[in-house]
Amino acid sequence: MARYTGPSCKLCRREGVKLYLKGERCLSSKCALNTRVKSEGKASLVTAPGQHGAAKKKLTEYGKQLREKQKAKRYYGVLEKQFKSYYTKADNQEGVAGENLLRLLERRLDNVVFRMGLAASHKEARQLVLHGHFTMNGHKANIPSILVKVGDVVAVKETESTKIKSLVEAMGETTAPKWLEVDTSKGVAKVVAMPERDDIDFEINEQLIIELYSK
């Protein structure tokens, strides 16, 4: 199964925003966006990785569209081929293509685990799913890209894992989106509605992504 195996902090630096790929580290002073900066007048700017990362660059319209697409891909932990297939599916659905795209990404099983508060990042959520710690509608679910639908129930599989038990105990600290009905005492989430655009708190301009793929 293809996946990105390089340094996570480089991705945040390249996009210039926190993608929350390393959980608690992203909220600490050790975050690369706090340590890899350059001063420009009164402002401090994040330096991109690479030899010429500190150079000031003016993005073209295409560059803005590309960066927005890369940002969304990296936030949800999806590679190019799969991300493009999501766009094709979203474009063929009724409604606004950009919102359809984000709705598909939000419905991924690994994102549901992340929204439940059982993982500090999408990367950790993906790992937990791959290791078989969850069930969906009572059946084993170890494929991160499974799309949930209204009525589906995602639950923590009965396990002796100390890590999973500690994650379930800490679930009360996270507020789940309104399209998920979460029982924090049991580590169970039921999909009660489709995610809406307002439910996505990460800043993404989906229109730029649609413009990029529409060319």
Image (cartoon, rainbow, N blue to C red):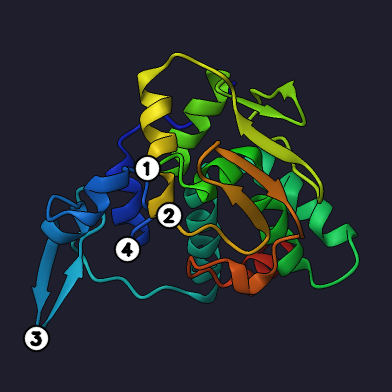
Name the disc covering residue 170, or none: 1
- Residue 22: x, y in percent? 31, 42
Marks 1 and 2 in Cβ contact (< 8 Å) = yes
Residue 57, quarter of the rendered image: bottom left
Q: Identify residue for label 4.
A: 16
Marks 2 and 3 in Cβ contact (< 8 Å) = no
- Residue 181: x, y in percent? 65, 54
Marks 4 and 1 in Cβ contact (< 8 Å) = no
User: Is residue 79 visible in the rendered structure shown here?
Assistant: no
Q: Nearer the viewer, mark 2 or mark 3?
A: 2
Q: Identify residue for label 2.
A: 174
Q: Residue at x 11, y 67 (%)?
A: 38
The answer to whether 144 is drawn above or below residue 121 in the figure is above
Q: Identify residue for label 3.
A: 42
Please tell me whether mark 3 sits on a helix, a strand or a loop.
loop
Name the disc covering residue 184, or none: none
User: Counting residues from the N terminus, which is met first, the one under dot 2 or under dot 4?
Assistant: 4
User: Counting residues from the N terminus, which is met first, the one under dot 2 or under dot 3?
Assistant: 3
Please tell me whether mark 1 sits on a helix, a strand or a loop.
loop
Please tell me whether mark 2 sits on a helix, a strand or a loop.
loop
Three-letter amino acid code at the position of disc 3: Lys
Q: Nearer the viewer, mark 4 or mark 1?
A: 1
The CA distance from mark 2 to mark 4 is: 26 Å
